[in-house]
Amino acid sequence: MTVTLAGAVDQAYAPELMRVVREMRSNGITVELQLERLSEEGCLRLLRSAEVCAVPYVNHRGMSRVLLEAAVCGTPVVAEDYGLIGHLVNSHGLGVAVDCSDPNALAAATVSARRETRRGDLEKFASRYSTDQFAAALNCMGIR
């Protein structure tokens, strides 16, 4: 298994992240690091090439741009089973939501999301947030 960790990392979290990376590598997982801020194009290119996107935001109640971008790219998601992200993943068939602090559950969800997520569910979710839908919403509010 190859795992790519991408995006800017808070320096306060960097030592813990590197500890987890060492642990993953000691368990036979190839870990590629791209720990810098990604451009929008770079992020989308990475998501298109991924088999699964992890969105393990513990205790995060809100939305995630990565969740929407993964759906646009047709990439299934493994997410924390908490808050809005977990709800959207479960209710729209975007992948699998689990307790991401459980390594066994996370590994099983990664395999399951790849196998069981339907591209049509991802496309349908992404279409709800298209440029045309946004323009229609603005039009309904009288904003041109």
Image (tube, rainbow, N blue to C red):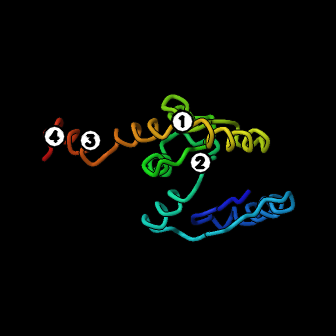
Residue that mark 4 sits on: 139
Residue that mark 3 sits on: 133
Whether residue 136 sits left or right of residue 10 in the image: it is: left
Neighbor class of circle 4 (other Cα within 10 Å; few <14, some 14-19, many 20+) is few
Q: Quadrant of residue 138?
A: top left
- Spatial separation of the CA atoms under disc 3 and disc 2: 25 Å
Residue that mark 1 sits on: 89
Q: Earlier in the sequence, mark 3 or mark 1?
A: 1
Q: Are marks 2 and 1 in contact (CB under 8 Å)?
A: yes
Residue at the image point whose x is 60% and y is 63% from the top: 6
Whether residue 134 sits left or right of residue 4 in the image: it is: left
- Name which residue type carries label 3: Gln
Q: Earlier in the sequence, mark 3 or mark 4?
A: 3
- Name which residue type carries label 4: Asn
Residue 57 has which mark? none
- Spatial separation of the CA atoms under disc 2 and disc 1: 10 Å
In the rendered view of the protein, which quadrant contains the N terminus?
Answer: bottom right
Q: Earlier in the sequence, mark 1 or mark 4?
A: 1
- Spatial separation of the CA atoms under disc 3 and disc 1: 20 Å
Identify the residue at the far top of this view.
Answer: 91
Residue that mark 2 sits on: 55
